[in-house]
Amino acid sequence: MAQQPLPTGREPILLRPSRSSATIAGMKSSIGMVGFDADDTLWRSQDYFDAAQLEFEGIVGAYVDLQDSRARARLYEVESGNIALFGYGVKGMVLSMIEAAVELTGQRIGAADLHRIVALGKDLLRHPVELLPGIGDAVEEIAARHPVVLITKGDLFHQEAKVRQCGLAQLFGRIEVVSEKDSATYARLLDEFQLPAREFVMIGNSLRSDIAPVLALGGWGIHVPYHLTWEHEVAAAPPADTPQLVQVADASALAEAVRTIAASMAVARDGSAAGAG
Amino acid sequence: MAQQPLPTGREPILLRPSRSSATIAGMKSSIGMVGFDADDTLWRSQDYFDAAQLEFEGIVGAYVDLQDSRARARLYEVESGNIALFGYGVKGMVLSMIEAAVELTGQRIGAADLHRIVALGKDLLRHPVELLPGIGDAVEEIAARHPVVLITKGDLFHQEAKVRQCGLAQLFGRIEVVSEKDSATYARLLDEFQLPAREFVMIGNSLRSDIAPVLALGGWGIHVPYHLTWEHEVAAAPPADTPQLVQVADASALAEAVRTIAASMAVARDGSAAGAG
């Protein structure tokens, strides 16, 4: 894989001169750390949440017409309204499902059916961790050259359980479970790592949570999309010529993308910010 | 407060020679970091959980006899059985309450009542943070002399919200929300802090979570009991002559207890391990 061009329809654009690379021109800069997202970057996650949503609709659909009641939209509204109180993760989702089910059915839903909603949450917490194709090799190859950390948001307990099961935990120098992945969070972590943002590369499937906040701090992002995206994570793609962002199609291209960024830093470091585009 | 003797019925025993202080005799050792627990150490917490339990019993008590059904014991059994899946915190507790309520009532409980259980959980997540008397001054005084960190277990999102509200966040160099407070967790944190256990002092109300695992690593503990203890946290008190443990009655004695430990380390450092008891 190492010798192949990036298998993506989008040309990597990070070698062009940019404000960011101008800023770092002449400064000694190299990759100090590579961060990985977890859900839908290392392992499948959204598939299970989508399946749980269908189960929820199956349960509520015995009481009300799903279309007429706008069941899916209503659940999303309840979930969104509760995020400031519950945060992300399965347990908060189940509590929101119970609220939505009680409301959608006009309190007609039976205790056994509400219990089924709790049970589908427990199944979700227990689902086996299934690594995405090629990600194990990618993390291993990148970890051989750079310190790598795992940065994931959501439920602390569930995320730690998945990390333990995934078989890659020993490759990560740190496992950071955070409550929100915004610029403030990344800034705090980089401060703890004592790392300038320009030496940090974040890899993930969510433009909103993994890429945009890191680019905003002056760091680098490698976006590896997943075939499913939770409505909450949908974000506008950055402009095609966004500096310091690399798009790849899948995990097999990650190690090469990291090497490309390292080469770009070397170009900037040597004061020659203009390069191949 | 600084000039008063420790207001506890139990004599501090840490100045006696012990295997631990013998080990560190002659080694340069001083307090490198002081950790604080949060729930029931910085602020009231168990009171709210106990009140929620009474509300739960009020709801379920409309369907069954609480004594005959062993409602309280059954809820605790369900909670304990779910901890390996849910971890600690309000959201997991509410899901366990729903499970227990459905089971205790033989699925007779109405949707509106199950919704009330979700609502009591939301109230619990929203309750204002009420600092315990004297703790603000204590943290401030200790933070003026040593780096302090907050180490709390439970729900990441809820704990972070309480930290934001408590007004003391700026005094803590790090806020660590962990999924379990056992020796392995403390060992990992001390490794991250690059601190030997013998230079670490942990302050908290739970012998099981705050004190025993730190003592086991060779660190120091200051136990400040709270008037309520969750059944899960009840642990046998260490022997009265446990080295490296100081018992205090309340927050007003914490700064003095930290000074006592610092003095004890100085004694050990000078190779004179025997001292006043």
Image: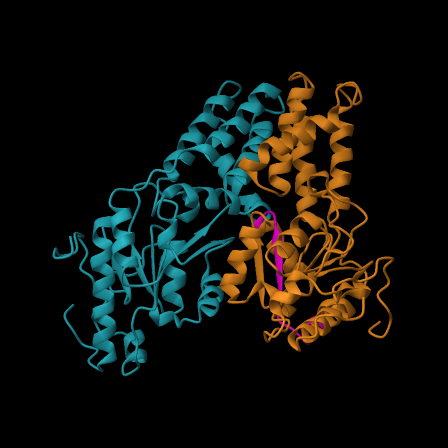
Chain colours: A cyan, B orange
Q: Is residue B12 above or below residue A228?
A: below
Q: B116 or B221: nearer the eye?
A: B221
Can residue A67 be seen here? The reply is no
* Image coords of residue B186 (percent x, y): 57, 56
* Image coords of residue A158 (percent x, y): 49, 42
Total marks in image: 0
Q: Check if residue A240 falls in the magenta segment.
A: no
Q: Is residue A245 above or below residue B123?
A: below
Left or right: A41 as drawn, with respect to A240: right
Q: Is residue A52 above or below residue B201?
A: above
Residue in the image at 26% along x and 52% along y:
A138
Q: B43 or A175: nearer the eye?
A: A175
* Image coords of residue B58 (percent x, y): 78, 29
Residue B98, quarter of picture: top right
Left or right: B96 as drawn, with respect to A6: right
* Image coords of residue A20 (percent x, y): 31, 74
Q: B19 or A76: nearer the eye?
A: B19
Residue in the image at 65% along x and 56% along y:
B215
Quarter of the image where the C terminus of chain A is located: bottom left
Can residue B203 be seen here? The reply is yes
Residue in the image at 34% along x and 38% along y:
A130
Residue segment shown in magenta? B140-156
Residue in the image at 75% along x and 67% along y:
B15
Left or right: A127 as drawn, with respect to A133: right
